Image: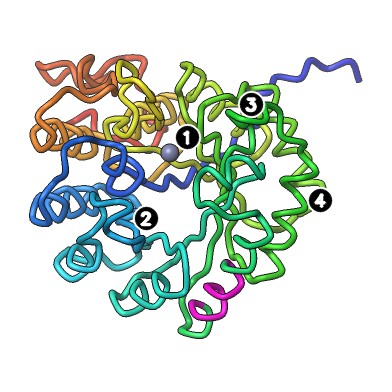
Amino acid sequence: MGQIHYPLSHLPERVSIREVGPRDGLQNEDVILSTEQKVRLINCLSDTGLKYIEVGSFVHPKVVPQMADTAEVFARIDRRPGVVYSAIAPNAKGAERAIAAGVDAVQVFLSASESHNKSNVNMRIAESLAAAGEIARIVRGAGITFEAVISVVFGCPFEGDVPIEQTLDLVERLVDLGAEQITLGDTTGMGNPRLVQEVFIAFRERFPTVPVRFHPHSARGAGIANALAALQVGIDRLDASIGGIGGCPFAPGARGNICSEDLVHMLHEMGIETGVDLPNLVECSRLVEELLGHQVPGQTLRSGICGHIPDGRPNPRFRASNSAIHVAG
Ligand code: ZN
């Protein structure tokens, strides 16, 4: 009827955030935290209301020394009821170690492009799918959630554009293996908002009911814009990293996870619920700085939370209707 369509009025009311800092973030840091320090960080994150935390990875310790103590970390963290503590397994042995450590969910990683898969795990995609099948059997046989992450969906550093159908064919194979959630990753930050929407609209058309999550990277500054673009087409599951660690924008080869507290801040200001206590999350970011011994890329830690001006007066722009009702304290 000639009405103007305002896309921002169609955003999800609530967004689920998976915190990937302890794995994706720390894995890409030069500083290797002690087990004790990782446990402190994860316990801090567990107290924020986050419902999904990527704890570590059961890869060979020689390949990723930062993650060598993942089983020990699982043994020592305080597990909060209702929080999913996940880990990555690259093969059957990793899956068995993950199960023994008591993980809630196991993720497999594959690339949408052959060249990236080869470079990342030295296998063809078909070989990675065979490995994923073996992992799925072990994990699902143990009654644990099996999930899949597809890398470089929005651009491959070797091949450039990745055909959407190529990604979706891979999704179909992973769903057939029993993947309960699919994550599409913009691993090298090559995505843009228009492409993000095209990919997720195509995903939804082909897989109307498969739970899907977006893992944006901000290697070229578009991460949070891409996250918003995904929300506009109904994607309500996003990955982010505390402090934005795992990709300092000033470091060569920066990976650039988007920053959890910056994302939560933006969502709360928009009236979108996350279930996360933002001031507590910012404190976790402060802890990350202390543990790593350098500043994090996240901006909220520097600028402060709107509505949390030091004398305690609420920012009038901070709507009482949104979920982050911390204006009184
Ligand atoms: Zn990442």
291 with respect to 17 (left or right): left
Residue 59 percent coordinates (x, y): 36, 60
Up/down of 112 relative to 219, above or below:
below
Q: Main secondary structure of the magenta part?
A: helix
Q: CA distance from mark 3 to mark 2?
A: 26 Å
The mark lying in front, picked from 4 and 2, is 4
The mark lying in front, picked from 4 and 1, is 4
Task: Identify which amino acid the numbered label 4 is placed on.
Answer: Arg
Q: Are marks 3 and 2 in contact (CB under 8 Å)?
A: no
Query: Which structural element holds mark 4?
Result: helix
Residue 62 percent coordinates (x, y): 28, 56
The mark lying in front, picked from 3 and 2, is 2
Query: Which structural element holds mark 1?
Result: loop
Q: Could you tell me which residue is drawn at 72 percent across and 62 percent down? A: 173
Label ID, residue 51? 2
Residue on which the image places disc 4: 206
Q: Could you tell me which residue is drawn at 30 percent across and 51 percent down? A: 64
Task: Identify which amino acid the numbered label 3 is placed on.
Answer: Ser
Task: Identify which amino acid the numbered label 1 is placed on.
Answer: Ile
- Look at the image and give the residue range highlighted in magenta: 132-139
Q: Residues within 10 Å of mark 2 (few under 14, many from 20)?
A: many
Label ID, residue 272? 1
Residue on which the image places disc 3: 9
**Which part of the image, by quadrant, shows the N terminus?**
top right
